[in-house]
Image (cartoon, rainbow, N blue to C red):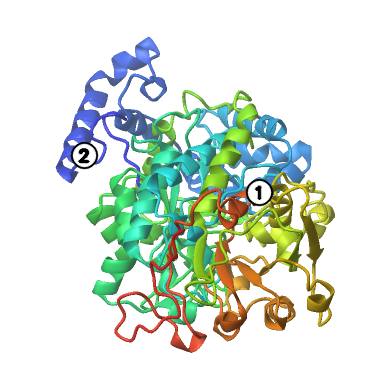
Amino acid sequence: MIKRGYPSMAATIYGVRSFFLLAAIVILLSGRSGGATAATRGYIKYKDPKAAVEERVEDLLTRMTLPEKLGQMCQVDRFNFSFYPPATRHEIFTKYLIGSVLSNPYDTGANPSKRVVEANTMQKLSLSTRLGIPLLYAIDAVHGHNTFINATIFPHNVGLGATRDPDLVKKIGAITALEVRATGIAQAFAPCVAVCRDPRWGRCYESYSEDPKVVTMMTESIMKGLQGNAPYVADFKTKLAGCAKHFVGDGGTVGGINENNTVADNATLFGIHMPPFEIAVKKGIASIMASYSSLNGVKMHANRAMITDYLKNTLKFQGFVISDWLGIDRITTPPRANYTYSIEASINAGIDMVMVPFQYIEFLEGLTKLVNGGYIPMSRIDDAVRRVLRVKFSIGLFENPLAEETLVAEFGSEAHREVAREAVRKSMVLLKNGKTNVDKVIPLQRNVKKIVVAGAHANNMGWQCGGFTLTWQGFNGTGENIGRNKAMQLPTGKTRGTTILEAIMKTVDHTTEVVYVEEPNQDTSKLHADAAYTIVVVGEAPYAETQGDSTTLSIAAPGPDTIRHTCGSGMKCIVVLVTGRPLVIEPYLDTIDALVVAWLPGTEGQGITDVLFGDHPFTGTLPRTWMKSVTQLPMNVGDKNYDPLFPFGYGIKT
């Protein structure tokens, strides 16, 4: 997303166009004058780690055939290798010369060492080819290494936005990088730098805030953790190549509908949606992912004005632009209606690497015909490959192509979980504390005779983690019974962590009776009239992308009845919302004694009880405006008609 690979990794990688032009001239002249002598000695510049990155890129590029170049522009799914017959799967790399592999969000992992072995098996096949160009392996790691069982799962970005703590977010980026590298993977499709302007959008929890200043601050911090302070990657063994997504305007679609059209004037585009990408480019992001959405009617995967003219030529982005999953297919309506056109339009617009992810033979054949027919100029192909190679050289893949198992001990470590727990408690936002100013409920007393914990969200690890956890749409329960995984013979298993109920039971006094009622009814308040208070945990079921689009933003059933049968029946109640966005809560507010937003906290539920029981203060503030009803949406801080239930930045401190 923002990478530069220039004369050297350390020096000024982010320079002016004249500098690169001069460097290119020097490289060409030196190649012409000394090529024969060098060849006689057997010297190969692109294999020389002491040579400047740009020189190595140009040397390798001149040696590549068209099939070798096009292979670098293609990313395929790991399942092609893992599930294809052993006799032919090696051809992905040895015949079709594929340059990149991804693990999709359904690609649940359970054994870091086993994944390292598989990553190295694929890598060795790539290294066995004529030029030995290493493979780039990527994965969605959007709130920790989220597809792996027993990884440290952090709060989703909306919760991190509530912390307003860039140093903490940097730590989270560094831990994510370590755990991903521990499984042999070199790139994360993160950070998501969307500025969500409408919580009806199913990806709003992937956005740090509705405020571009908050998103920009967090983008810079997470990048420092993922990639290090140098452009691209500071330390290949412990850092990752990042990928800022989704360029551009994905958080501003009409109606908050995923992949829809964003209607934006220049003030909106460059004042709200572009700033996070600008800082990402400035700080050296390795790649940028195009958005499924359209901008003023133009599909972003085919938007040359934004990808080439602005991102590459104006911002001077030097890394590579990658499509989203089947992103070029969706240029047409219906998707893939004219695949040849989709290839031509996307590559000419400036897409450098296409996430195919399965029909790579058809893609390569189509791309080859378009190049040979003159529909896509060789200069465009060379630009794309140059950018991919620049990242591979700059992150150290040529010198360190094989993953090591030395980081496996870091995976899901207690030290990492302590940082996740800190993130949870700092993300918690207290919206109400007592029905009157003198009737404070929080901090809760832990030494009481009896308390009730109500609601299915209180004891459901999958629901408290949200989407993009173990699988694309998240999971229900512990992780031991994921139907799709069993059908595909993918791993299942209880993932480590602490549910909210477990955290409460660990926190209260050992003499306190904790009664868990998963689904309260009209008799609950009578049966437990002697309880000192009730902690009610409700919210949303997990979702991702389009499946999360909502026109109502209602609390998921039976959540409303859970509130009515507890808070609404006279029990002193503290409501904890497990949600990726603001939900309609005003109808229940008068019956609630205290209201807390936990967002989607991840695996470390103990962070919730840290603040509920007063071991740490509430410090989080709303990263989003909390509406009274959906009829007010979209509504963001600074709008003319701003009448929220709780304003942006609100949060009671304790």
Residue at image point 42% right, 81% down:
644
Of residues 259 and 63, which is closer to you in this image?
259
Percent position of residue 141, x then y: 56, 48
Side of 66 relative to 50 (left or right): right
Residue pictured at 22% horizontal, 21% vertical: 33
- Whether residue 340 is visible, yes or no, is no
Mark 1: which amino acid?
Thr
> Badge 2: how crowded within 10 Å, few (<14), some, or many (20+)?
some
Q: Find disc 2 in the rendering and name its residue.
A: 20
**Image point (40%, 80%), residue name:** 635
Q: Can residue 214 be seen at all in this image of the molecule?
A: yes
* Observer-nearest of 595 and 622: 595
Relative to 31, residue 70 above or below: below
Residue at position x 56%, y 42% from top? Answer: 98
Residue at the spot of label 1: 147
Q: Is residue 453 left or right of residue 244?
A: right
Q: Looking at this view, name the residue that lies furthest to the bottom.
A: 631
Instruction: Indicate the secondary structure of the residue bearing disc 1.
Output: loop
Observer-nearest residue: 10 or 312?
10
SS state under label 2: helix
Does 136 appear above or below 288? above
* Residues packed near mark 1 inside 10 Å, few (<14), some (14 to 19) or many (20 plus): many
Q: Which of marks 2 and 1 is in front?
A: 1
Kind of residue indicated by mark 2: Phe
Q: In this view, does 211 lie above or below 69?
A: below
Taking depth in this image into account, of 158 and 451 the one nearest to the observer is 451
Residue 469 position within the rendered picture, expressed as x and y whole percent measured from the top left? 65, 54
Left or right side of 20 for 244: right
